[in-house]
Image: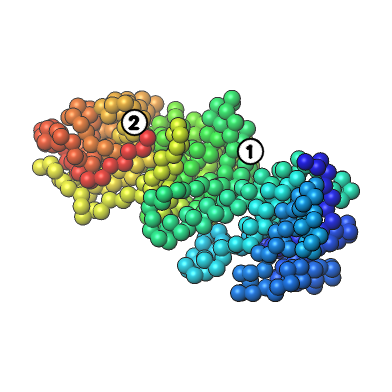
Amino acid sequence: MTELSPVRRALISVSDKTGLIDLARALAVGGIEICSTGGSAKAIREAGITVTDVASITNFPEMMDGRIKTLHPNVHGGLLALRDNPAHLASMETYGITGIDLLVVNLYPFEETVAGGGDYKTCIENIDIGGPAMIRAAAKNHAFVTTVVDVEDYDELLAELSDLDGHTQLAFRQKMAQRAYARTAAYDAAVSQWFAMALHEKKPRRTIFSGILAQELRYGENPHQCASFYVDGSGRAGVATAIQHQGRELSYNNINDTDAAFELVSEFDAETGPVCAIIKHANPCGVARGLTISEAYLGAYDCDRTSAFGGVVAFNQTLDEATAHMITDIFTEVVIAPDATMQAIEVFSKKPNLRLLTTGRMANPDQANQAIRQVSGGFLIQDKDAGHLDLNSLKVVTKHHPSQTEMADMLFAWTVAKHVKSNAVVYVKDGVTVGVGAGQMSRVDSCRIAALKSQDMARQLKLSRPLTQGSVVASDAFFPFSDGLLTAVEAGATAVIQPGGSMRDDEVIAAADKAGLAMVFTGMRHFRH
């Protein structure tokens, strides 16, 4: 392969005209002939820069509403010809094909069209054909041809040409070729996924994932693991789209915990009141509803102050100054909210290591989304858990019926349990979690741990009895035996919400009746592994 390759002739065909004129002008000043198509040629010409229309190269006009313009041997021959192959050179001379040394292409805005709600026909018309074909041809022939597909690479290209007197080096062309193939792969992935959704195909034969590098992370879960953060371009509100106002770069664990926190508070409509969630190691250690943001924060904090240290705090409403002061009283890694007042931002500015993120809006918990997990040799794909209870389908299975207050607390606890690693047990009283048991191998252990944490917090708050006294409890899956239920009774719970469905449901119901508990079956579980 040729180490240095001259750039004498460029073909530019771009949908995104950002930086186009500056690029074309710099190429022209460097003595590089510019060929272009349609709107790109028009914009370059109007800027007073000499440009050759592709139609004069192909000897065919653009036709079929622009569907046909670059699919021609005079274009693809110019991109694919090996400059050191005598047979290729002979073919170029015989058929009047001139080499193209630089291709600058960005594709029809298919992803943007889909994200903007375009109808089926509009989306189809925004599938680029000629662009990917040229990109793949030029990138394949990177021994001689430079391929640029991202506006962000224009400056790097011009610097390369300037430093090497109108040439590009092989390493640069290889790097650009990799980016080119990644772009066409991502584009095809977007088209494929959209088609599957449009056809309501839940399990296509082949599936493809793509992402755009958003951040090179210092390391992964541990310092010896390399990691990066990619965004999928869906625009879903959350850590991927948030504005970071201050603080160090987010780490791998920060991003994971912040996503968990924001997804949880997004379950609660801001119009029904402020909700705060504090997350540690992707599990809620405190969640509370309050009359004010500050009250919600204090309720969440008082569930487990020890675990809240170094945690991630999320809100479903605008963060205010008073709450910001409370948060800065302890070590907090990240705060995320739909917005924050200028006064709150000013408070955080005095804590340079604390990251503050605002998203502009809450995530839609009902939005179609997929959860993807890699396993050895493959991927597990499932719908995101967007399951919500139909209140009419709840079944009271005990003699004692829950009060209105107990029912409200049970629904709150059930929503929180959905975001706790299984086996999950959540105690709630007056819209505040008072004990969370997460990730244990047995459900009874989760019940015990949550109760023990409540006892610890009662001692810390100098209360005469555990916070779980008079609480309700939610279990993400059924109680297989009555032992877990009886542990909740010992902790002071008065009502239970659980899926039901155990072979021993009758035994568990009998134990609840004997203890005077109210118990509701949901018919739905929320495993979170």
Residue 396 has which mark?
Answer: none
* Looking at the image, residue 514 lies above or below residue 409: above
Label 2: which residue? 437
Under circle 1, the secondary element is: strand
Q: Nearer the viewer, mark 2 or mark 1?
A: 1
Q: Foreground: 449 or 105?
A: 105
Quadrant of the frame with the N terminus: top right
Under circle 2, the secondary element is: strand
* Looking at the image, residue 509 lies above or below residue 361: above
| Residue depicted at 36% across the width and 46% down the height | 385
* Looking at the image, residue 334 lies above or below residue 408: above
Quadrant of the frame with the C terminus: top left
Decide which of tag 2 and tag 1 comes sooner along the chain.
1
- The quadrant where residue 376 appears: top left
Can residue 257 be seen in the rendering of this structure? yes
C-alpha separation, residue under disc 2 versus residue under disc 1: 34 Å
| Residue depicted at 26% across the width and 37% down the height | 477
Residue 455: x, y in percent? 32, 26
Relative horizontal placement of residue 173, taking residue 434 as reference (left or right): right
Residue 439: x, y in percent? 36, 30
Which amino acid type corresponds to the residue marked 2 in the rendered image? Gly
Can residue 358 be seen in the rendering of this structure? no
Which amino acid type corresponds to the residue marked 1 in the rendered image? Glu
Q: Foreground: 37 or 154?
A: 37
Residue 216 has which mark?
Answer: 1
- The quadrant where residue 277 appears: top left
